Amino acid sequence: MAKIFADMEDSNASSNPSIHEVSALSRRTVLRGGLGAAVTGVLAPLAGCATGGPAASTRLGFKSVPVSTADRIVVPEGYVAYVIAAWGEPVGLSGESPAFKFDATNTAAEQEAQMGMHHDGMHFFAQAGRDGGLLVVNHEYTDDGLLHRDGMATWTAEKVRKAQAAQGVSVIEVAPTAGRWDIVRPSPWARRITARTPMRFSGPAAGHAMLRTAADPAGQRPLGTLNNCGAGRTPWGTYLTCEENFAGYFNGPDAPNAHERRWGLRKGGFGYRWQEHDERFDVTKHPNEPNRFGWIVEIDPSNPSSTPVKRTAMGRGAHEGATVALTRDRRAVVYSGEDARFEYIYKFVSRDAMKPGGAGANAELLDHGTLFVARFNGDGTGQWLALTHGAGALTAANGFADQGDVLVKSRQASDLLGATKMDRPEWIEVDQEGWVYCTLTNNATRGAANQPGIDAMNPRANNTMGHIIRWKEAGDFDGARFSWNHFVLAGDPSNSRAEAKGNVKGDAFACPDGMWIDARGVLWIQTDMSTSAMGKDDLAMLGNNAMLAADPRTGEIRRFLTGPAGCEVTGATSTPDGRTMFINIQHPGESPSERSDPAQPRRVSNWPDFQAAGRPRSATVVIHKLDGGVIGT
């Protein structure tokens, strides 16, 4: 969805200095050797990745698969992959099991009992005493050309309700039977959470004036979650889902005010047209409704009757994920990035320590604490800036009357504090040695006219390839300062364009997006090259999107999986024993317009069903090693 979302990005017009303006590093130095020439001490742990050839990995025990343009999933020799939960499959609600109709004639009510569309982040929750567990799956957006029989040729209230039902989150019970995993139906844990599911606000912004609407004058009871992209799992057993590019669902005013412009609201949005039959998505009638989205939502999958909670203490943004670490005294630290060009990286540190007793004992843990935004320095150091009302410029004189204002307007607050503008910060993961990794997918406008130039952190103009950075906190995860380096600059090391040169040691890739670190410490990287750019210029040699495995100790990267044509590979998780992996394939068959039309004469893909008259379906995929071993060994 990078092309569609691009028009909603670049809303950060703040005058924050880029790293280039505060760094002694020149562009030539940065491009010649990453940061090695200037920050050798910081890069020392990455010698295998940043300089020379890597040592042989002891963690990666499979042979790389080649680049592929085939309309199928390719995994290494000795592995098998199969679909378990495609869009439209019934989730297992008691008494409701509507089958998917390949002509897209399922009703909105049926869609509410089926897997949503365009699977993204997910996590597996093991269940004590059971062979299986619960899979919680995000659904990022809807493609109305596939969702409805005639696409958007006609537009009705029923179609809007169906689109809203295909958003959100699915909770399914899965279990192995005779060596093959499947959905358990019916299941007491099965659940669909959609754009119409009742929720509640908690934390400092709950009840704030900017969250109040005519339907909810107390500002306490939002309705629904949407554009659910990355995710996180808490140590107390709950699921965090993130509302990413929510602005595109709203019809903005002809002349947006400063707040609306900063959040990318515009007339018509992304063209979803929900406002025609659900007026809460019309900003001209309900100006505060967009403020009720963009939050991290906590869900208890083990309690299907629980109400999802939008945790406002962690701030509002186009969050891509929410990764949880614990300090030594067991306070929660939640890292997140905003997937938009020139936006920021955040962390939230809870006030209180996690208690024993699971979700119930920690029901308010994420409601109290401090939100920080990152400032990276060109010398390989950085600091976390507190988004606290009254601190520094965050005062009433600058438009922040209270902490609720700061959290609802976290972008504006970060602008004022001088946070570092990044190249689309997305998924974040923490390894066993305390390094925190963040994917920066790409930013083709870096260095363009009237846009920020290159800097130490984002060292390539017209950054079509993307990169992964990592940092280590000073002391514990709640540290105020950190040291950082580039884990890898993605791309082809032999590329003739200096700005596009990467330093991948192993298999080349571009546009890192999804990311996950398994129990062995393997860093799994998933790619999201836009279909509008795939196969062109520097991306031509990379084929379909893929999933790769990296050994952080050696820097070696191997291609583990390639996806079907037109897809994004995303969402990785596994069973505790590491012998079953689950991944998601999103928008197979996506066209270069990034919108599908059922009338187009030839589709790029009909995966996974391969029916001549069928429709491509996003799906969750199970991966096994044929010898029953741990994935990746």
Image (cartoon, rainbow, N blue to C red):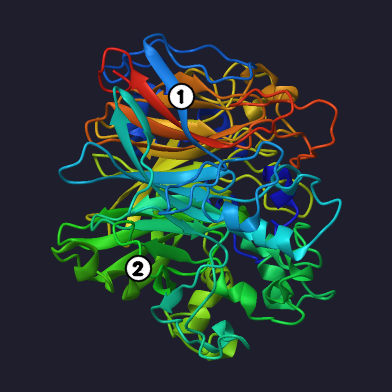
Q: CA distance from mark 2 to mark 1?
A: 32 Å
Q: Residue furthest front?
A: 95
Q: Residue beneath label 2, please?
A: 306
User: For residue 81, which quarter of the picture?
Assistant: top left
- The amino acid sitting under disc 2 is Ser
Please name the residue that numbered disc 1 is placed on. 82
Q: Indicate whether 503 appears above or below 223.
A: above
Sort mark 1 into few (<14), some (14-19) or many (20+) by Cα contacts within 10 Å: some
Q: Percent position (x, y) of residue 413?
A: 54, 73
Tell me where residue 544 sits by quadrant. top right
Q: Residues within 10 Å of mark 2 (few under 14, many from 20)?
A: few
Q: Is residue 286 above or below residue 8?
A: below
Return the residue nearer the eye: 369 or 160: 160
Question: What amino acid is found at the position of numbered circle 1 in the picture?
Answer: Tyr
- Disc number at residue 554? none
Of label 2 and label 1, which has the lower sequence position?
A: 1
Look at the picture and state if 175 lies above or below 633. Answer: below
x, y percentage for residue 569?
53, 33
**How far from the left and from the top, in percent, is residue 64?**
44, 13
Is residue 414 visible in the rendered image? The answer is yes
Q: Secondary structure at mark 2?
A: loop
Residue at 80% across, 39% down:
597
